[in-house]
Image: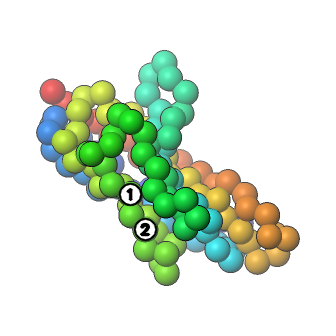
Amino acid sequence: QVHLVESGGGLVQAGGSLELSCVASGSILSILAMGWYRQTPGKQRELVAGISRRFGTNYADFVKGRFTITEDNAKNKWYLQMNSLKPEDTGVYYCNADVVSPNGLGSPADYWGHGTQVTVSS
């Protein structure tokens, strides 16, 4: 099994910064893609940022120029640096990974963390 754990959420004033971290553990051969999603009231869970070796980085329009996704592949960790935070960034942020297990026949499976709350006050 694969387990993802987020950390770094909290309360911050508008214009401030937070860094979210995610670490994956368990039966992992490789991680093909890593990402961050968020869920806000009345909306479906949406992509914030993603990173993969094949496609590089991908950002939602609403975070471009403000957020940066990075990874430490050797440690199965990835990060979301969030700058210039806005109240509308408030939500539950989830990390995600496409993971290939040693005995998984080469097919990746999606795994999700349980979420971390980010609250941006005005």
Q: Is residue 115 visible?
A: no
Answer left or right for 59 relative to 104: left
Q: What residue sits 64% from the left and 74% below the top?
A: 30
Task: Tell which of 85 and 112 is nearer to you.
Answer: 85
Q: Which mark is residue 41?
A: none
Task: Give the SS element for disc 1.
Answer: strand
Judged from this view, the residue extending furthest toward the front is 55
Q: Which mark is residue 69?
A: 1
Q: Does residue 29 appear in the picture of this structure?
A: yes
x and y percent of residue 78 in the render?
Answer: 43, 64
**What amino acid is found at the position of numbered circle 1 in the picture?**
Ile
- The relative height of residue 91 versus residue 110 in the rendered view (above or below) is above
In the image, 93 versus 31, the foreground residue is 31
Mark 1–mark 2 distance (CA, rounded to whole Å): 7 Å
Pointer 1 with pointer 2, Cβ within 8 A = yes
Residue 88 drawn at (x, y percent): 30, 27
Which residue is label 2 attached to?
A: 71
**Residue shown at 19%/42% (left/top)?**
84
Secondary structure state at the residue bearing disc 2:
strand
Q: Residues within 10 Å of mark 1 (few under 14, many from 20)?
A: many
